[in-house]
Amino acid sequence: MNGSGKKKTASGRMIVTFLLIIMQIVWLILLVNKASNNMDWLSNIFQILSIVMALYIVNKDDVTAYRMGWVLLIVIAPVFGGLIYLIWGDKRASIFMRRKIDAGMEGIQEYLSQKPEAEQAFRRAMPRAAGCAHYLSHRCGFPVWQNTAVKYYSLGDFQFPDILEELKKAEKFIFVEYFIIEEGLMWDSVLGILREKAREGVDVRIIYDDFGCLSKLPNGYDKELETMGIKCLRFNPFIPVVAVVMNNRDHRKMIVVDGNVAFTGGLNLADEYINHRSRFGHWKDSGLMLIGEAVWNFTAMFLQMWNAFRPGDKDIEQYMPHEEYEGQFEADGYVQPFCDSPFDYEAVTVNLYTDMISRAKDYIFIFTPYLAISDEMSMALRMAAKRGVDVRMAIPGIPDKKLTYRITRSYTIPLLRAGVRVYEYTPGFLHSKSYVCDDETAIVGTVNSDYRSLYLQFECGVLMSGNEAVLDVRDDALETFEVSHEVTFEERIKTGFFGYLERAFDSVLKILAPLF
């Protein structure tokens, strides 16, 4: 099948899938409505269920805005609300999937112990950031490493050639994990190398998220890759059934080559990410290349996910970094790759971002394509600005999703009022996800500053401290602000009847934003 035929098949699959979901929702509402009208006692039971669910939600240890959204929905639709929450609302993943993910870590965790010398050196060199590193290594199981070189890319256009170059050097294994893969120049170039390496006997494995690729790849593409000698895992196959487990997507992006080199960042394997295709103006993304010991954290993340669904790796040590890679690894500050999972009862990235905001002394610069944050994160940003910290945030100038863009803009209003400076990237769509603080620490990864990324999806990132790359992230932010439009509070607040109407609409969107 040619490329255009595959795209038509993928698009058709997406349309059919969503039509089936809509039909299920409509059928469920009609069924409950009919049953309630014919049987008053059943309607009373559904309303009692809604009351019980509302009380459960209010007392649940969860994000305030998430709870408010569901309580509002139950108040608006007391007959259906409680039932909808039971089917869709609880963010906890299925016990079945949780057990698989936990099992995937067996045999790997013992190799993720923190080296005391690295931690002690970190504490001496950067005492202000030491608590963050301790949290990641001791609470979350992702040690901090030295002996790792870091290269920062301010555009996907710059990262792509290095990805191809490092893939060609692979001798042992290549691990690829992405939310979106789409046929085109970028993916075809990568796939050509992967096929060749598989023929040479290199262990090539790919994980892609089935929902992320729903409109990009035809059904059964994983089997097509297997015929090329490439092992493939289609994560959480998307079934057109209204179920909470469909919320948990693999949004991570990583490539690991021979355990010595890793790539991550906002880029997916599709042409708009390298500006080979223009959809929303100039696409600004960012990424990292790591060479050295810290790559092991990424290898472990991949192996955990792989062995959760395709168990079989016994000799874990063979995947660890080896110093014969062009001599000794270079040392550049401290590097700590991490994963954020909806299964571990830890909002890892929320905690990291909030800690960074709270200890910022001079400045904190933020890139995010979407903004829908908790009251706690919003309060931390506003308080930082009020205590004199230079807080700046860049968001897209051209949206990829208009409703999401409206929600993002609405979340900036209280920030602007408090003195946070907000910039819209006028050349196009900003897809970078980064935080940088005081020339000391930075986080670059896959995590958007919205509820889906922060609480529901599998994500990954890199905490860097004392690296040259931290300054590169800072310089990129300053250059981006220069070509962006700085938004004022007055711009966001429209007066008159229609202004009040728009703000009322935005208020409803903000309440419902965490639900979607």
Image: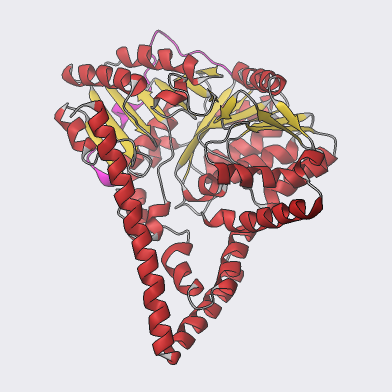
Residue 204 falls left or right of residue 404: left
Residue 315 shown in magenta: yes
**Is 450 in the magenta?**
no
Residue 235 drawn at (x, y percent): 32, 44
Between residue 430 and residue 440, name the one nearer to us.
430
**Spot occupied by residue 441 in the image (x, y as percentages of width and height):** 65, 28
**Closer to the camera in the image, 90 or 297:** 90
**Direction front: furthest residue:** 497
Q: Residue at x 41, y 46 (%)?
A: 249
At x 58%, y 75%, the residue is: 55
Spot occupied by residue 141 in the image (x, y as percentages of width and height): 48, 41
Vertical placement of residue 374 versus 333, above or below: below
Whether residue 236 appears in this view of the structure is: no
Is residue 383 depicted above or below 364 in this figure?
Answer: below
Segment colored magenta: 307-332
Q: Residue at x 73, y 27 (%)?
A: 438
> Tell me, what colour scheme is on the image?
secondary structure
**Res. 41 in view:** yes
User: What's the residue at 43%, 36% (across, down)?
Assistant: 252
State whether residue 312 is above or below residue 444.
Answer: below
Residue at the extreme top of the image, as rendered:
326
Q: Quadrant of the N terminus?
A: top left
The total of numbered circles placed on residues is 0
User: What is the magenta segment's predominant secondary structure?
Assistant: loop
Residue 403 % position (x, y): 57, 46
State the residue in front, 231 or 144: 231
Figure check: 409 above or below 295: below
Q: Nearer the viewer, residue 238 or 95?
A: 238
